[in-house]
Image: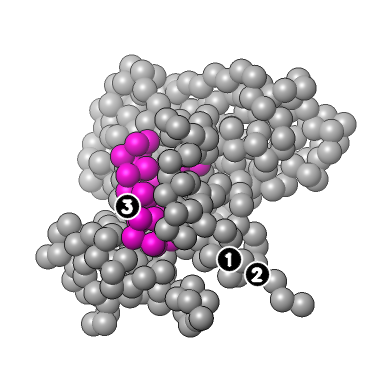
Amino acid sequence: MTARESGPVPIVVQGLGLLGRTAVSLCAETPGVELVAVVTRRPEAATGLPADVAVLPDLAAAGRAFPGALVLSTVHALDEELAEVLSEAATAGLDIVTSSGLFHPPTQLADGGVALDAVARKHSARVFASGVQPGFVLDVLPAAVLDLAPGWTAVDVVKPSDARAWPVSTRHMLGMGESPEVVASSVPYPLAASAQLIAHAVGRPVVALRESRVALTAEDDLVLGDETIAAGQAIGFVHDCVAELEGGRSVRISWQPTLAATEETDLALRLEATGEAELSLRLDGSFRRDPYPATAARMLHTAVRGRGLPAGLHLAVTPGLTWGGTLSL
């Protein structure tokens, strides 16, 4: 039997930031997996780990020490830099899932993911595009439920987020605490890939797409535990992406994080599909506040379920719901 077929799935966590630490803790709570190593460029930071967990400098070393392991990559990388990280793992014969914003490789990578797919196939590895919030609830979930509204013509998905628990660096990278002009001038995490993923899932190509961000500003100084944001600066934003699909159908995705959330703020995910059949979906509770546990769980569960898939690059919608990727009757 191969390493992928016998015993618990060996897990390697790449990166020991907040998300990496969350992934380490999650492994202890997840059936059928075993944390065997962490990969970090700062070995001095690898404290508080179980005694039998190896600390390694790179993914090549992980491949030599634990052939056939599964990597949870929590390092922040995008586009071609991210493709290099994923290719490094695949070349080492390791399955890998990323927390970075890779939702739809055909439109996010320069060659559509062809080279990465070839590397993974050559080395019998699986590369999973899973991505962080706002992924999954703005793409995989809508794609999975639209069959409940056959004949839909328009879909509207709104995802509010409480950003108060996010690190200062993440908030400023997204424009919070900056001027409204900074927010409107860039899109650090495009939603176009999520729109493309929904279109891919329903079999209707995108014929037109527009995307924008508008800042939510503070009327008065907003005092947080780790900084004070001056009145007039951005304390959140409304990030909209509208995709017109072949056949006259449309998909609107709206991500709305804010630092001004209170216990009374409605943070429910809301999906409305209209047309011949209508669907209204509301999902509340588990998406309040810090998204890191949900992101780590999504990464781990997607990749473990996909271990039975052929080698290559896989979209986030590909792994099924069965643990381990196979179903025995």
Residue that numbered label 1 is attached to: 308
What colour-coding does the image apply? one colour
Q: Is residue 131 visible?
A: no
Q: Is 193 located above or below residue 292 in the figure?
A: above
Q: Nearer the viewer, residue 96 or 191?
A: 96
| Callout 2 touching callout 1 (CB < 8 Å) | yes
Label 2 packing within 10 angstroms: few (<14), some (14-19), many (20+): few
Residue 120's x, y, as percent?
45, 53
Residue appearing at x 72%, y 47% in the figure? 145
In the picture, residue 52 is in which quadrant?
bottom left
Residue 232's x, y, as percent?
31, 21
Amino acid, disc 3: Glu
Q: Which residues are magenta?
A: 78-103
Amino acid, disc 1: Gly
Residue that numbered label 3 is attached to: 88
Q: Is 62 located above or below residue 81 in the figure?
A: below
The first of marks 3 and 2 along the sequence is 3
- Label 2, secondary structure: give it: loop
122 sits left or right of 44 in the view: right
- Disc number lying in front (3 or 2): 3
Q: Measure the C-alpha gap from mark 2 to mark 1.
A: 6 Å
Is 80 colored magenta in this rendering?
yes
262 sits left or right of 39 in the view: right
Residue that numbered label 2 is attached to: 326
The first of marks 2 and 1 along the sequence is 1
Q: Measure the C-alpha gap from mark 3 to mark 2.
A: 27 Å
